[in-house]
Every structure is written in C-alpha cells, then in structure tokens.
C-alpha cells in the first residue's frame, strides 16, 4: 500500500469516527417522564378561569431559573435550554438531555391551571431541573445510561436546594403575609429554623408543595385531600422511580423544606447521603420511605 493510499484510508476512518461521535453526542436521551403522569387536560391561552399565573410571571420564573443555574451548568461544560412553551396548553412539564444540553420543557397549560401560583410554577421548574441535578437515586435509561434523577429525588431536590435559591431573592415577609400558610407547616418551619429568613422560605416552599399537590389531586381525582399532618405511612421495599402518590409527594416537598443541610452542600450522583438529611443522623428532613428505600441506594 502506498503512503498516499494509506493517508486517504486514515482520513476516511477519521471522518467516519467524527460523524459517529457527533451523532452520539447530539442524540436525545430520554430518561424521565412528565412532571405529572400523561393526561388529556389542555388549557389554551385565553380560556377564562380563576387562578393560574400570567405570562409575565411565567417568564419571570424561567428568567430566574436561568440566572441561578446557567453559571453552574456552564462550569460543568454543559448548556441550559429552557423551552418556554407558553402558548402550548399541555398541563405538564418535562426534562431531557441532548448531548451536553440540559433541557427543560415548560408548558403554559400547567401555568394556567387554577391551583398554580408563582410558588407552584417555581417548584415545577425546580423539579425538572432536579432530573439533571438532584443526584441519586437515578433512573436507568433504555441504552444503559443513568443521567436522570428519579421522580422522588427530583421532588426532594426542588425543596431541599432549588426553591431555597429561588426564593432567596424575594421579600418573603411581604409575600408570606399575603398567603394562607397551612398552620401545621408554619409551626414546623418555625420549630425547625431559628432564623426568620429561613422560616419564611420554608413556609413559601410549603405553599409551593400545597399548590402542586392540589394540581395532582385535580388531575387524579383523588377523594382524600393531602395534608401536612397526614403523612403517607407506606414503606417501600425497593425505591420507586415513578411518580409517588399525591400525599407522598407532598411529604417529600415538606421534608426537603425541613432539612437544615446547607444549599451549598452538593448532592452526589452515587451517595444519597451527601448534601441531604438521612436516617439515623436526622429524624426530620429525610426522603420519605413511601418512595425511597435506603437499602438499594
């Protein structure tokens, strides 16, 4: 074989390898379901109803999420893309990865639902960010990877880390004064935290959890309303990666809000204890056993 022929052959191999590499890094890696199970509810723009948030509030939530997480994601070598699908009436949200791009799909239909305020919308965005950032436990995807944190982990991340950063920029005393905070949640927040600022953020997180729990109840037609003082007593024998039941999800938001571990303590993709509350070290603020089984994590 001549040197010219050899060089041409190597060039072809290099081109094929480059094309193949480019294809693999750009594939969309599905690994998590919607914020709520698939449903037929659709709320178009302009439908008269009470409740929900405005387009301006919707955009504010997305702007702040980008402000909070773009620096961290960029430092990790990735990109953040939030699809602001305001005109889409789908009552859901989702997350996906495409190459090194972390994607959130945020739909206007969910934002217009009667149960949703700014707190609830922020929680939904935080949950979807959680699929990227919440660490263990992860969902194994169809091709063997594990980029997405499971539903319960994403719920826990939303209240443990994300919403604390999100609400930190607000005048929470003024905002909480205009909300009707559940007295059980209020008392728990005041018992767990001595700092007024932490108490107020905890209370707003409880309000966010209540709003989305009411959304779950409306979509599933649950007959029993979820409450902060009626935790789900179920104890799983294997971690459940799918959507927990309504009460269990409210419990998860509440426990995340009550965990005093610092926001700056990062969660781990392999060690669920890192950056979070866990038994027996803590008795409050741990992942609820209605979806989480420590023995297989």
Image (spheres, grey):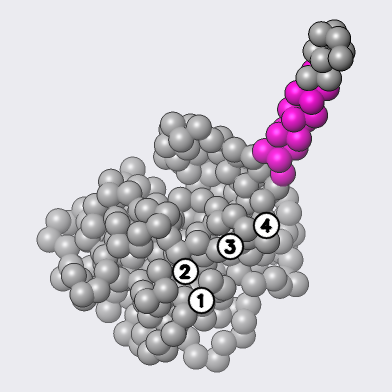
- Point out which mark residue 140 bears: 3
The answer to whether residue 124 is above or below residue 83 is below
16 inside magenta stretch: yes
**Quadrant in the rendering for residue 90:** bottom right
Cα–Cα gap, marks 2 and 1: 8 Å
Which tag, 2 or 3, sits closer to the chain's start?
A: 3
- Residue to which mark 2 is pinned: 152
Side of 102 relative to 86 (left or right)? left
The residue lying furthest to the front in this view is 1
Q: Residue furthest left?
A: 194
Which of discs 2 and 4 lies nearer the camera? The answer is 4
Q: Which residue is depicted at the point 29% across and 55% down?
A: 275
The residue at 86%/9% (across/down) is 2
Q: Which image quadrant: the N terminus? A: top right
Mark 2 and mark 1 lie on one chain; the one further toward the N terminus is 2
Residue 26 position, x and y percent, is 70, 39
Q: Residue sitting at 60 percent across and 39 percent down?
A: 101
Whole-percent x and y of residue 179? Answer: 36, 64
Of 104 and 296, nearer the camera is 296
C-alpha separation, residue under disc 3 versus residue under disc 4: 8 Å
Where does label 4 land, which residue? 143
> Residue 240: which numbered mark, if any?
1
Q: Position of residue 121 (x, y in %)?
A: 51, 57
The range drawn in magenta is 11-27
Task: Verify CB contact (< 8 Å) between mark 2 and mark 1.
Answer: yes
Q: How many angstroms separate mark 2 from mark 4 (CA)?
A: 22 Å
Q: Is residue 13 above or below residue 66?
A: above
Q: Secondary structure at mark 1?
A: loop
């Amino acid at each position: 074989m001549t040197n010219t022929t050899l060089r041409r052959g190597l060039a072809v191999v290099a081109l094929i390898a480059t094309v193949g590499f480019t294809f693999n890094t750009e594939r969309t890696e599905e690994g998590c379901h919607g914020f709520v199970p698939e449903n037929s509810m659709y709320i178009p723009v302009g439908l008269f109803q009470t409740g929900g948030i405005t387009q301006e509030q919707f955009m504010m939530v997305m702007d702040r999420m980008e402000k909070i997480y773009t620096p961290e994601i960029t430092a990790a070598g990735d990109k953040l893309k939030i699809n602001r699908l305001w005109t889409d009436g789908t009552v859901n949200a989702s997350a996906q990865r495409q190459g090194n791009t972390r994607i959130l799909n945020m739909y206007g239909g969910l934002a217009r639902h009667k149960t949703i305020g700014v707190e609830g919308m922020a929680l939904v965005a935080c949950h979807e960010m959680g699929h990227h950032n919440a660490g263990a436990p992860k969902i194994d995807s169809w091709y063997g990877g594990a980029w997405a944190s499971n539903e319960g982990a994403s719920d826990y991340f939303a209240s443990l880390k994300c919403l604390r950063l999100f609400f930190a920029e607000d005048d929470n005393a003024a905002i909480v004064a205009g909300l009707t905070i559940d007295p059980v949640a209020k008392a728990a927040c005041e018992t767990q935290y001595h700092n007024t600022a932490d108490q107020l953020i905890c209370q707003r997180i409880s309000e966010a959890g209540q709003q989305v729990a009411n959304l779950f109840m409306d979509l599933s037609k649950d007959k029993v309303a979820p409450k902060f003082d009626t935790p789900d007593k179920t104890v799983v024998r294997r971690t459940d990666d799918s959507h927990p039941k309504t009460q269990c999800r409210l419990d998860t938001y509440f426990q995340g809000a009550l965990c005093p571990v610092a926001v700056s303590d990062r969660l781990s993709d392999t060690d669920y204890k890192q950056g979070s509350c866990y038994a027996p070290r803590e008795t409050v603020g741990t992942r609820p056993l209605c979806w989480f089984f420590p023995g297989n994590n």
